[in-house]
Structure formats: C-alpha cells, structure tokens
C-alpha cells in the first residue's frame, strides 16, 4: 500500500471511529480470529428479531447485532428515518420523515461499511460516457460496524451495530443551529425497540441531548435532558415492474431530482415523480380495482366523533382516481383499540391525530419513497387537534402590536420539503369565520348551524389536502382562481363545480358577505386540477408518450392552472404572479378582498362587549378583534401583489390556449389594487374601532404570564404593523425594479405613477387639516422609507425609484414647512417630518 492510500485509509478509519466502534487507526487489521466464537454461540441467549435483516439483542447489556448474509452485501436497500417523538423547540416533530436514501452494506476486511448511494444522476447505458459514470460523484460511507463472527458455510456475517444506532451517523438527529439541543449524551441514549418483518427491519432509538442553552419552553421538561425518538428503517428494494414517471413543470408533483449526465439537452432532467404503485387488477377494463389499494388507517387516538367525518373526507379521493381508471383506489380503515401494531410501524399508512403543546404544522402529510424509481413506499398524516380550537397558537397581534402572518409563514416553512402549515392557516381562518358567524351572520343560517358547517368543511379540506400530499401532490397556490366572486357565493355553481380547482391551496375561508348566499366554506371534494393530476401520476394509459403529451397539453385550461410555494407571493419580494398566493379566493382577488373588508367592517361596527356572556372573560372578544386584524392584513397583502405583478404561463411552445410566458398585470388592475389599499389600509380611518370595544379587549390573566408585553391593547402598533407589511411589498427593491423592467414588455403603470399613487394615499386626505395619530405613524414610516430609498446605500433600488423618492421628499418638505392652521399635535408632526427629511437628505 502506498503512502497516500494509507493516509486515506487512516482518515476513513478516523471518521468512522468518531461514529462507531474501536476502528483501528493503522489501516486494515488482519482478518479477525473468528474460530473462537461462532454466530450461534454469540447469539445463544439473545432475543431474536427475524426478518429482512435478522437482529439480535443481548438480554443483559441490550447490545444489538445484525446478521447480514453475503447475498445482501452490495445489494441496495432503502433507508428511511422518521421522528417517532420529537420536541418542537429542539427542531424535531413527531411523524416527520427526516431521511430517505439508498444504502448498501459493503465488506471491507473485518468490517461492514454502510454506504449511502448517490441517486442524483443518470447515465444512458448506451452512451460511451456511461463508462465514466463515477467521475466526481462519490458515495458516502456513513458508518462502519465491526464483524464479530461469521459462518463460512451459510455466508452469514454478524456485526455489532450499537455504534451505528446510538450515534448520528445514519441520520443527523439534532439541529446543529439550535442552541437548546446541546450535545448527544451517549450514556443516556438507547435502543428502545426492534421490529423485523420480511420487507423491513426497524430500530427505534431514543437520543438524549444535554448541555444546551436553558429553555423555559413548556415543551421541554428539563433542558438538561432532551429526548428525541427516531425510527430507523431498513427496507427491501421493491421487486416489481414499477415504471418511473418523469416530472413536468406544468404539474405539481413531489419528485426526486435526477440529472442525465449523458444528455446534451439544456434541460437534462429525469426527475422521478413520487407515486404509489397502483396496478389495475384487470388491465383491459376501463375502470378496475387496483391489485393493491392505498390503505389508510385512522389511528385509534382519533376522537371517536370525528372518525366518520375523516373517513368520508378521505374517500372523496376515489372520485379523482375513478377518472384515472381506478375504482376503490383508496381504502380507509380504523385501527382497532387492541391492535398489535402502532403508528410507527412503516407497513401501515396512518392518519395520526395528536394534540401538541406548540403544533408545528396543524396537518402534515409526509411520505418516503424508493429514490431509484420514485415509488412511494409508505406515508403518514399527522393531524393536530388544535386546528379547530379557539386557543390562539399563532396570533398575538394586539397585545404585542406586531408579529405578522408572514413571520409565521417564514417560521414554519423553513422546514421545507413536505412540511405543510395548512392547519395553522386554517385555524386562524376559522377564528375569522367564527367571528363572522358571531357578529355578521349571513342570511338563512344561525350561528350554530354555521359553526357546524365550518367544522365539517374545514375537516374535509384538511384531510383531502394532507392526503393529497401523500399521493405525491405539492401545493397549488393558484387553485382558488377557479370561480368568480359571484360564483363562489352561488350555491348552485358551487354544488356543481366545487369551490376550488384543487384542494392543495391555502384558501381564504369563503364566508358570504351580507346579502350573499353562504355556500361552502372550503372545497369538500377534489377539484378538476386534482383529477387531472391523479390521472397524470397514476393512469396506466399515460405510459404511452403520445397520450401523456395530449394530457399535459390541457394544462392551459382555466381550471388546471398551477403554481406552488416556490412561486407564491406570501412574503414581500417573493414570487411575481399575484394569482399564486395564499389566503386569497376567486379569480378576482381584489374584488373578493373588498367584499371581505365589508365583512370586517360589519364585524367591527357590530361587535360589542355586551355580546360576551355573563360570567365569561373578554378573551373571545380579543380573539375576534385579532381575527379581523388578520383578515384586514391578508386582504391588503393579497391586493398589493397585483401592483408590479406579472402573470406567469408555463405552457410549452405551440400549446393550444397558451399566452406569453410573462404578461404584466394590466394598468387598470394595478390602479384598482392601489385604490383599494388607499381606501381600507392607508386611509385616516383604517381599522377604526368602537372605543368601547378597545376598552374591553382584555385577555384572561394566567399566573404571571403577560404574553410578552404589558397587557393593554396596542392598536396603533397593530395597525402600523399591517401598513408596514404592505409598504414592505410596494417599496421592495424587487417590486420597484420590476415596475421599471416590465415597461419594456407591456406594462404601462410606471414606478413614478405607483409612488405618486402611494404618496397620495398616505397624505392627500388630511394634507390641509389635522392629522390623527394612526395616520401620523404611517406618514413617518413612509418618509423614513423614502429616505432609505433616496440614500440607496446598498444600491438595491432602481434609479427611477431613487429619483422619485428624492422628488417626493422635497415636495413633502415644502408642504409641511408651510404655516398651516392646524392643531398642536399636527404642527409638531409636520415639523418632525420636515426635520426627518432634512436630516435624511443631508446625512
Ligand atoms: Zn400542504
């Protein structure tokens, strides 16, 4: 062995030693003397778990050994890790699939290496380049286990896997960015359970962390010992004739990205669609039951009164599968109370119901796949009971005078991948619905009837949505563009067509304004996009490329439009197509927002402390106010995105019904959006409330908890936070730049016109008179932002916006420096503005 090789060996051995065992540091040791103890002798007293891999557990020490047959060496199997029980504060939550890869066990002298295979690339075997397939692509040796005995006759090899399981070598468990977690405490960590079946062998391990920063979160019992339970599964590579299907940019599939390195195309993608292995029992029949249906189990922890509702909701998916040629594709069963398996058993797909202290999602549909083909092997759905509660988990706008839904979205969605925060969004939408029902009930329905329907519709939507994820669907935040505002409040239309093109959006709750008909609050059955998607992913007919092309060519239809989280406009400066958004509804979101603001005004004008029942605290009143603040902010955010927006079309060249890929929003629509914002969000009376209501906005005291701030209602802060959120978008460098860029391909609403409209919305109405306190806040905020743009310290703002900011500052200074007959507060405010401008321009 030459020196370099020896060094490499040493490095490998060192890194392995950190993970596992007493690996030697001087390169490979001679083969072990295995004559002394046979496998039989070593495992004589051990507990045996026979299956895909056979495992042994020592009855005294709990030490775990794995039996690997030489036939299994170098054979690929699937590895997946799922959090069996997490601590949200420590970055892990129950049910999340955190690892999913292809592994092999490789022999290297006296040890077995567990090697993760790189599945990201494809080499056409007919191309000579495929001979260089391994160039610059390396597999990862995750862990090493010592061979302790072997049987030359049977080819069986026994390895000790304590180190493999009790370290983080297979899967990083702790969140290294999270200071609360601390370091892994090997002495306290242990293997809790082993299960082995013909196709999978599972190990449940409890990892204990200590030494992190103290945390006072209620989730953490004692921050000196944080336990996270992880389920590691080794799963046999499926032996079937599953045909991989490739992703298409017009359909929102979850997929495994694979790049063809032998292709010369500019888009050498062979991204594998995640889908179940559905095969028709009768391939010639137009409609056939599948050989194996997708079976869901409702966990026995589910409240009994909800089970029927959940089952009926989930079975709605069969309607979509029927259009793809399958009858009874989805089956739903209830886990018996005395079942001898639990939800962690990967052989069962379980609809799980939990009630967590701080739910990270409210609904979540993770799955794991064969990374070689995209076949979904298993899935679970985590549901949080809180989504129907009135207990506020997310909104403290009034007491804190800040914190926004966007902050929350960011907080939740950093957990990328299959994470879904629909449940949280729905909880907050439902709080609005309950407030509307209490204070602005639509005609023909009592508040109680309405509440019942809200529960029914939201449960259907949540179940359909989370199941949709497990069928391979990612979000379609464009799906609420389906109906006009009028149609969404027309029962006949909604009954016939449904409410949304897909259940994969985060919709606004569809509450009827006064004088309109209450239809569905949420879609209760899969929409046309969902059926089209299911056919794309599952119809055996579409194995034929021509049939597939014809199916995809329909993507330009109004009810099949698609845009996901990557494109949506929930946060300022993110996304460009205003139709792709959360919390919106209908194909005229601006008009819908206006209707919604009518409802909000209705509630604000009608609500009274007298509506609170005698003997109750005013907590429900606070919930209602905060819900209305949330609706006001959402309506504003949705509307603001039309300003500087660009409609995106992903149709391919020549596709019937295609428009150009980028189409700036028409000037009239942008002006309409600005006008709505001026009226409801920037006007002097924006979110004006009855003083009596504000004076009663008191939360119930609990111990010494003041909810992070003094308890008094801080309406100024809450209103300014909402207005600032809108300015964040309208004055975002990317939006201002887009207003300039789009003038080169059709946009006629220029950046100077937009900034003048905004200026007028913020100053015109009270320019010559007295200026109230909420308006003073807004004007100072706007002037500060103009100064920031004028200075352009980071060079992010377009020249035209910088010039406009300078011009407006000069004009504002001139105006406010004039001696006007106003009250003393307005006079002080005027001088303050002038001073801010002078300092800003000359600093
Ligand atoms: Zn979702």
Image: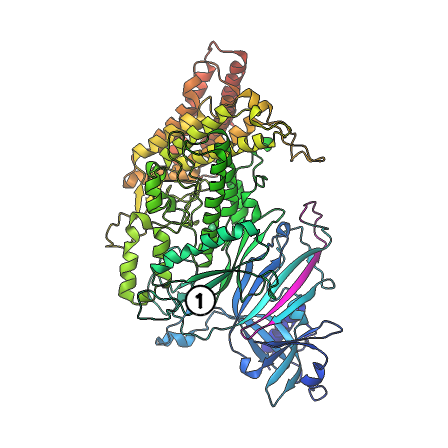
Query: Residue at horizontal 27%, vertical 63%?
Result: 547
How far across and how far down the image is residue 811, in percent?
A: 41, 21
Where is residue 144, by image quadrant? Answer: bottom right
Q: Is residue 725 visible?
A: no
Helix, strand or loop for disc 1: loop
How far across and how far down the image is residue 816, in percent?
A: 46, 17
Q: Is 549 placed above or below 13 here?
A: above
Q: Is 506 placed above or below 837 here?
A: below
* Membership of 198 in magenta stretch: yes
Check disc 1 and report the residue beneath it.
375
Given residues 444 and 216, the one toward you in this image is 444
* Membership of 364 in magenta stretch: no
Query: Residue at horizontal 54%, vertical 12%?
Result: 824
Given residues 832 and 559, the one toward you in this image is 559
Q: Is residue 773 visible?
A: yes
- Left or right, residue 685 beside residue 263: right
Q: Residue furthest bottom?
A: 153
How crowded pointer 1 is (Cα within 10 Å; few <14, some 14-19, many 20+) is rated as: many
Q: Which quadrant: the N terminus?
A: bottom right
How far across and how far down the image is residue 507, in percent?
A: 43, 43
Where is residue 576, by image quadrant? Answer: top left
Query: Residue at horizontal 46%, vertical 73%?
Result: 134
Region of the chain picked out in magenta, as a range: 196-219
Query: Residue at horizontal 43%, vertical 54%?
Result: 474
Given residues 333 and 839, the one toward you in this image is 333
């Amino acid at each position: 062995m030459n020196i370099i090789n020896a060094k490499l060996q040493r490095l490998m051995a060192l890194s392995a030693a950190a993970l596992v065992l007493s690996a030697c540091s001087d390169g490979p040791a001679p083969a072990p003397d295995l004559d002394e103890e046979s496998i039989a002798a070593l495992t004589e007293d051990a507990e045996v778990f026979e299956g895909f891999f056979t495992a042994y557990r020592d009855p005294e020490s709990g030490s775990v050994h794995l039996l690997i047959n030489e036939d299994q060496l170098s054979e690929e199997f699937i590895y997946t890790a799922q959090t069996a029980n997490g601590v949200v504060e420590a970055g892990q939550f129950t049910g999340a699939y955190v690892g999913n890869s292809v592994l092999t066990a490789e022999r290297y002298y006296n040890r077995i290496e567990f090697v993760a295979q790189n599945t990201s690339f494809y080499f056409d075997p007919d191309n000579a380049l495929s001979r260089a397939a391994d160039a610059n692509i390396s597999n990862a040796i995750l862990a090493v286990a010592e061979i302790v005995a072997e049987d030359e006759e049977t080819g069986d090899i026994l390895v000790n896997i304590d180190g493999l399981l009790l370290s983080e070598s297979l899967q990083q468990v702790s969140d290294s960015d999270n200071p609360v977690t601390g370091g892994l405490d090997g002495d306290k960590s242990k293997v809790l359970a082993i299960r082995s079946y013909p196709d999978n062998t599972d190990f449940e391990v409890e990892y204990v962390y200590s030494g992190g920063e103290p945390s006072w979160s209620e989730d953490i019992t004692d921050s000196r010992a944080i336990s996270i339970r992880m389920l590691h599964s080794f799963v046999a590579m499926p032996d079937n004739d599953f045909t991989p299907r490739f992703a298409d940019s017009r359909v929102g599939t979850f997929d495994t990205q694979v790049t063809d390195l032998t292709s010369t195309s500019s888009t050498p993608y062979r991204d594998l669609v995640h889908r179940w292995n559905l095969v028709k029992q009768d391939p010639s029949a137009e409609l056939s039951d599948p050989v194996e249906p997708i079976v869901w189990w409702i966990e026995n922890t589910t409240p009994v009164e909800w089970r029927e509702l959940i089952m009926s909701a989930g079975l709605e998916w069969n309607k979509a599968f029927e259009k793809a040629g399958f009858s009874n594709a989805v089956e739903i069963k209830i886990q018996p109370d005395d079942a001898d398996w639990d939800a962690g058993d990967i052989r069962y797909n379980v609809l799980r119901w939990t009630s967590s202290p701080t739910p990270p999602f409210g609904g979540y549909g993770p799955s794991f796949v064969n990374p070689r083909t995209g076949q979904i092997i298993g899935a679970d759905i985590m549901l949080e009971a809180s989504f129907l509660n009135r207990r506020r988990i997310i909104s403290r706008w009034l007491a804190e005078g800040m914190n926004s839904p966007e902050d929350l979205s960011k907080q939740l969605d950093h957990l990328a991948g299959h994470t879904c925060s629909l449940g949280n969004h729905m909880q907050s939408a439902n709080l609005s619905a309950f407030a509307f029902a209490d204070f602005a009930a639509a005609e023909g329905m009592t508040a109680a009837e309405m509440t019942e329907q809200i529960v029914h519709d939201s449960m259907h939507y949540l179940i359909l949505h989370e199941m949709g994820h497990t069928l391979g669907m990612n979000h379609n935040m464009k799906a609420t563009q389906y109906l006009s505002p009028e149609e969404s409040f027309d029962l006949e239309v909604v009954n016939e067509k449904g409410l949304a093109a897909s259940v994969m959006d985060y919709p606004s709750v569809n509450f009827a304004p006064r004088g309109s008909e209450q239809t569905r609050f949420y879609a209760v059955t899969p929409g046309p996009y969902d059926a089209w998607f299911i056919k794309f992913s599952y119809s055996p007919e579409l194995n034929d490329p021509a049939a597939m092309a014809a199916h995809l060519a329909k993507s330009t239809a109004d009810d099949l439009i698609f845009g996901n989280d990557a494109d949506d406009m929930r946060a300022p400066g993110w996304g460009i197509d205003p139709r792709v958004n959360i919390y919106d509804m209908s194909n005229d979101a601006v008009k819908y927002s206006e209707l919604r603001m009518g409802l909000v005004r209705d509630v604000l004008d009608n609500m009274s402390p007298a509506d609170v029942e005698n003997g109750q605290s005013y907590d429900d009143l606070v919930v209602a106010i905060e819900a209305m603040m949330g609706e006001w902010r959402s309506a504003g955010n949705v509307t603001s995105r039309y300003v500087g927006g660009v409609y995106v079309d992903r149709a391919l060249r020549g596709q019937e019904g295609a428009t150009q890929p980028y189409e700036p929003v028409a000037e009239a629509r942008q002006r309409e959006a600005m006008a709505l914002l001026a009226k409801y969000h920037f006007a002097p009376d924006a979110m004006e409330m009855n003083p009596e209501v504000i004076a009663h906005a008191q939360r119930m005291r609990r111990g010494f908890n003041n909810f992070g701030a003094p308890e008094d209602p801080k309406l100024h802060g809450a209103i300014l936070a909402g207005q600032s959120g809108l300015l964040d978008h309208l004055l975002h460098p990317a939006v201002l730049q887009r207003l300039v860029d789009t003038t080169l391909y059709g946009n006629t609403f220029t950046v100077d016109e937009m900034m003048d409209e905004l200026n007028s919305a913020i100053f015109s109405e009270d320019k010559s008179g007295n200026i109230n306190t909420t308006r003073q806040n807004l004007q100072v905020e706007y002037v500060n932002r103009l100064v920031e743009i004028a200075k352009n310290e980071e060079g992010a703002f377009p020249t035209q916006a910088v010039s406009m900011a300078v011009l407006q500052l000069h004009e504002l200074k001139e105006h406010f420096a004039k001696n006007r007959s106003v009250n003393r507060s307005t006079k002080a405010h005027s001088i303050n503005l002038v001073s801010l401008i002078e300092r800003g321009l000359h600093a």
